[in-house]
Image: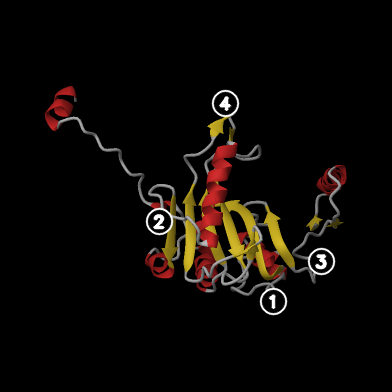
Amino acid sequence: MYGQESNYTTWRLCKMNLAVRGIDADIKWNSEGTFHKNELPDLCADVILANPPFNISDWGGERLREDARWKYDIPPAGNANFAWLQHILHHLAPSGTAGVVLANGSMSSTQSGEGEMRRAMIEGEAVDCMIALPGQLFYSTQIPACLWFLAKDKSNGIARNRKLRDRRGEVLFIDARKLGFMVDRTRKEFSDADIAQIAETYHAWRLGEGYADVPGFCKSANLEEIRSHGHVLTPGRYVGAEAAEEDETPFAERFSAL
């Protein structure tokens, strides 16, 4: 396991956490951060997990106008969301995948060229799956967030020791906003069943085994459909509404009860 952290206290906690679990790791620290002092410049990772700070504006982007990591255009100096996504893609191995937590605005923003960068990533087959999350999942913020699942090569890859199908020309959308339960007045959690439902849907779609669109929950959309939505990646636009249950009560009775 490899990583980098700019907060010294967080770095120490991370090192302790990994040591307690017996996980072999090389976690670097410097106060300048990974954008400006990349301690792992040659890293090609099979899997990347990231929860970067949302919508960060003071990331020093004005000093990184020319950088090899910006494959899908130069990210705006006032928002690091697409800098994080491109930095992560840059460090993926040829068949690597990544999961990134970001603010919901990253799915639809058109400010400062972000819409064009999102379009380029979609057309470049870098986006594998988008998941909308409910609010109140995090201690640090009440706002809902989303998950970006990225792939370096959607025609390739292995999961659960099985070859993944060719997913080029498709993106999976999952709307998980209705899942979860309140653990106290301010915070929500996913149950094991919720996590399994999301994970199994994604795995079934990638493997091409047992996947089916579920109205209101998941949809496999092709590029033409995504283009028709202006390359906005909000799952609610694609999954549609939940199927309504049939009411067999005669209309006259229902009307009278109303």
Of circles 2 and 3, which is in front?
A: 2
Side of 225 relative to 23 (left or right): left
Q: Which residue is mark 3?
A: 40
Of tags 1 and 4, which is closer to the observer?
Answer: 4
The alpha-carbon separation of the residues under discs 1 and 4 comes to: 46 Å
Label 3 near label 4: C-beta < 8 Å? Answer: no
Residue at 35% across / 47% down in the picture? 241
Mark-to-mark CA distance, 1 and 2: 36 Å
Mark 3–mark 1 distance (CA, rounded to whole Å): 19 Å
Please tell me whether residue 211 is drawn above or below residue 66 in the rendered image: above
Location of residue 253 by image quarter: top left
**Label 4 to label 3, Cα distance in Å?**
41 Å
Q: Nearer the N terminus, badge 3 or badge 1?
A: 3
Pointer 2 and pointer 3: residues touching (CB < 8 Å)? no
- Foreground mark, 1 or 2, reads 2
SS type, badge 3: loop
Q: Which residue was labeled with disc 4?
A: 185
How packed mark 1 is, by other alpha carbons closer than 10 Å (few <14, some 14-19, many 20 or more), is: few
Proximity of marks 3 and 1: CB atoms separated by less than 8 Å? no
Which quadrant does the N terminus fall into? Answer: bottom right
Asked if disc 1 and disc 2 are in contact, CB closer than 8 Å, the reply is no
Query: Between residues 42 and 87, which one lies in front from this camera angle?
Result: 42
| Lower sequence index among marks 1 and 2 | 1
| Residue type, label 1 | Glu
Quarter of the image for the C terminus: give it.
Answer: top left
Q: Which residue is mark 2?
A: 238
What residue would you read off at disc 1? 66
Query: What amino acid is labelled 4 in the image?
Result: Arg
Question: How far apart, in angstroms, are the residues tagged by discs 4 and 2?
Answer: 31 Å
Between marks 3 and 1 in the image, the one whose residue lies nearer the viewer: 3
